[in-house]
Image (cartoon, rainbow, N blue to C red):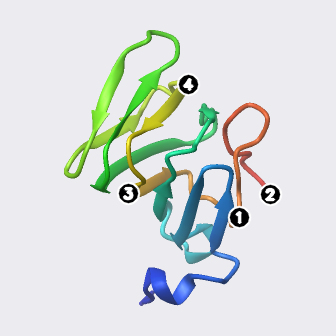
């Protein structure tokens, strides 16, 4: 059984600090679950265009408000507690946050560790 809390992982290699967000990696490839689970906080100052070409990302919002824009279409979707969304077509997107947003995110295939967004806005498959 795998058992730990997000608080236990803070300050470890699974506590990833990046430009505009913090991500605690609760499950990684080394855990052999076939997916990654993160607890992430997007900060109001986030200024990234993100496109996960190598991963599907699904997100459930726990706290905070804002919106996510799909770059290609200009469509904007409101973010607030209880919202679920998934980038099932690897959509390039940008966040505009009214407040910090805390969410649970699932990645498939799983992340290996401390990935941060590369120049394309996504994560490489192998680190």
Q: Is residue 110 left or right of 106 when viewed as pictured?
A: right
Mark-to-mark CA distance, 2 and 1: 8 Å
**Rendering quarter of residue 25:** bottom right
Q: Is residue 41 left or right of 111 when viewed as pictured?
A: left
Please give the label number shown on residue 92.
4
Label 2: how many Cα within 10 Å (few below 14, some 14–19, many 20+)? few
Q: According to the image, label 2 marks what residue?
A: 127
Please give the label number shown on residue 114.
1
Mark-to-mark CA distance, 2 and 4: 21 Å
N-terminal-most mark, 4 or 3:
4
The quarter in which the N terminus is drawn is bottom left
Q: Which of 125 and 75 is in front in this view?
A: 75
Q: According to the image, label 3 marks what residue?
A: 103
Q: Is residue 32 left or right of 112 when viewed as pictured?
A: left
**Rendering quarter of residue 110:** bottom right
Above or below, comparing residue 21 to residue 2 in the picture = above
Label 1: how many Cα within 10 Å (few below 14, some 14–19, many 20+)? some
The quarter in which the C terminus is drawn is bottom right
Above or below, comparing residue 113 to residue 75 in the picture = below
Q: Position of residue 63 (x, y in %)?
A: 29, 57
Report if the CB atoms under discs 2 and 1 are less than 8 Å apart. Answer: yes
Instruction: Give the residue displayed 72% in from the left and 48% down from the top.
Output: 125
Mark-to-mark CA distance, 3 and 2: 24 Å
């Amino acid at each position: 059984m795998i058992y730990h809390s997000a608080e236990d992982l803070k300050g470890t290699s699974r506590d990833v600090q990046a430009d505009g967000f913090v991500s605690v990696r609760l499950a990684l490839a080394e855990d052999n679950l076939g997916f990654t689970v993160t607890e992430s906080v997007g900060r109001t100052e986030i200024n990234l265009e993100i496109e996960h070409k190598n991963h599907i990302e699904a997100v459930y919002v726990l706290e905070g408000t804002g919106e996510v824009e799909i770059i290609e279409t200009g469509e904007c979707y409101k973010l607030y507690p209880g919202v679920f969304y998934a980038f099932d077509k690897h959509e390039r997107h940008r966040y505009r946050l009214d407040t910090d947003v805390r969410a649970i995110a699932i990645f498939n295939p799983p992340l290996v560790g401390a990935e941060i967004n590369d120049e394309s806005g996504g994560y490489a498959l192998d680190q």
